[in-house]
Amino acid sequence: MTTTLRIADFTRYPGGRYKRISKFSGEEYRDDYLAPALEKKEMVVVVLDGTVGYGSSFLDELFGGIVRKMHWRSVSDFDAHISLQSEDRSFITETRQYVADAISSNNTVRP
C-alpha cells in the first residue's frame, strides 16, 4: 500500500522550521502528517507541487528532521519509506541534499 501526501493540501504557503516560529512549519507537517503516515509501515509519496515555493528551513526540518527522528543511516533507508514527486526537480534535488546531510549527521560518532 501507498499513502500520498500533498503539502499543498496542508498549505499553499509553507512556513519556517518550527511551530513556535511560524504557522504551517516543517516541524508541524513532519509531526502531524509525515510521521503518522510512516507509522502505517507503507510507502509514503510526498507531492511537492502546488505551493508557492519552499524555504530551506521548511524542507530541512520536514525531511532532514524525519531522517534524524527515524535514525535512518542511509539514503536507501529514506528511499525505502519516502518517494518525492515534483514537476520542479530543484525541489527534489534540494530535499535530497537535506536528507544526505541528516544521514551524515546520524552517522557521525559523538564522544
Image (cartoon, rainbow, N blue to C red):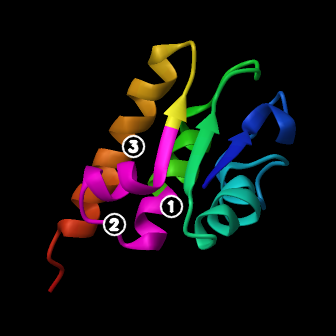
Mark 2 or mark 1, which is nearer the start of the sequence? 1
Kind of element beneath mark 2: loop
Mark 1 or mark 3, which is nearer the start of the sequence? 1
Going by the numbered disc 3, the residue's amino acid type is Tyr
Give the magenta range.
65-83
Q: Nearer the viewer, mark 3 or mark 1?
A: 1
Q: Nearer the viewer, residue 16 or 95?
A: 95
Q: Which mark is residue 111?
A: none
Q: How far apart in space, not on screen, are marks 3 and 2 (Cα)?
A: 13 Å
Q: Nearer the viewer, mark 3 or mark 2?
A: 2
Q: Left or right of 11: which side holds 25?
A: left
The x and y percentages for residue 72 are 33, 66
Kind of element beneath mark 1: helix
Q: How far apart in space, not on screen, are marks 1 and 2 (Cα)?
A: 9 Å
Q: Left or right of 78: which side holds 101?
A: left
Any part of residue 14 in sight: no
User: Quarter of the image holding residue 45?
Assistant: top right
Going by the numbered disc 2, the residue's amino acid type is Trp
Badge 3, how many Cα within 10 Å: few under 14, some, many 20+? many
Q: Residue at x 45, y 35 (%)?
A: 95
Going by the numbered disc 1, the residue's amino acid type is Ile
Up-down: is 51 above or below 66?
above
Q: Which mark is residue 72?
A: 2
Q: Nearer the viewer, residue 69 or 38?
A: 38
Q: Which residue is mark 1?
A: 66
Q: Which residue is mark 3?
A: 98
